[in-house]
Image: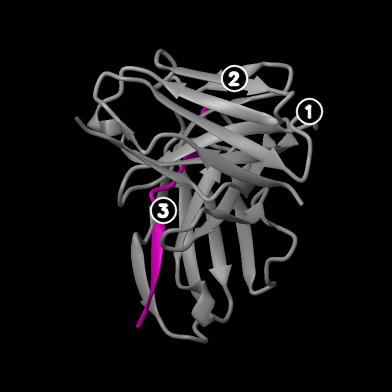
Amino acid sequence: DIQMTQSPSSLSASVGDRVTITCRASQSISSYLNWYQQKPGKAPKLLIFAASSLQSGVPSRFRGSGSGTDFTLTISRLQPEDFATYYCQQSYNTPPTFGGGTKVEIK
Amino acid sequence: QVQLQESGPGLVKPSGTLSLTCAVSGGSISSSNWWSWVRQPPGKGLEWIGEIYHSGSTNYNPSLKSRVTISVDKSKNQFSLKLSSVTAADTAVYYCARRRGAGYEYYMDVWGKGTTVTVSS
């Protein structure tokens, strides 16, 4: 299986901050990388697919980038509704695998 | 728009079989999508269990393959998960999801709300 490693595992930030989350794959996955947001007690929500394509309805402050083994999710100006846990997921190999998550908390 | 709803027993005895169903509404299960199961143990991350196409083709996570069966019922517009020989380690929130895309470029864009299954005697 391809291992996905996210960093940091958690971070504290303030409303309006720029936040960057990193995801690293154990082997090259080209651009086959998705990002999800999950709030407590809720299902994951797709934010970004194919490394940089914004899912319909997702605010443009979310941006994904990267290819190969290294990827980033950037939230340009953190909003109160963005406090959540974020997961990356590769679709290059079966089984699809997720990173361990990054919890974004309020400072 | 497509909505998914999981249902099934919330409590399963150790060594028993976990059985869940995902009802698809607002769209046809026979559309060009795969239908997936994902689980999340309490306080932990996400694990893909497997998926099915309306033709009955399946893919399973090798770590669970010996215990998992996913099936589809096109007449009821739903698909199901069976996980046998369960232990406490199978306690989790179980989600069903629609997988869109093709080739390597695919993603899970519609999710059910999830259902909690506890394995305990």
A2 part of magenta stretch: no
Image coordinates of residue A71 in percent, x first then y, are 54, 54
Mark nearer the viewer, 3 or 2? 2
**Would residue B74 appear left or right of B49 to someone viewing this image?**
right
Q: What residue type is labelled 3?
A: Gln
Residue topped by disc 3: A6
Q: Residue B71 carries which label?
A: 2
**Would residue A66 appear left or right of B115 to someone viewing this image?**
right
Image coordinates of residue A76 in percent, x first then y, are 58, 77
Q: Quadrant of residue B58?
A: top right
Q: Is residue B14 above or below residue A44?
A: above
Residues tagged 3 and 2 counted as in contact (Cβ below 8 A): no
Q: Crowdedness of circle 1 by 10 Å Cα count: few (<14), some, many (20+)?
A: some
Q: What residue type is labelled 2?
A: Ser
Q: Which chain carries label 1?
A: B
Residues tagged 1 and 3 counted as in contact (Cβ below 8 A): no
For the C terminus of chain B, the quadrant is top left
- For the view shown, which residue lies furthest in the top direction? B66
Q: In this view, does A35 lie above or below B25?
A: below
Q: Which mark is residue B30?
A: 1
Q: In which quarter of the image is residue B47?
A: top left
Q: Give the range drawn in magenta.
A: A95-107
Q: Which chain carries label 3?
A: A
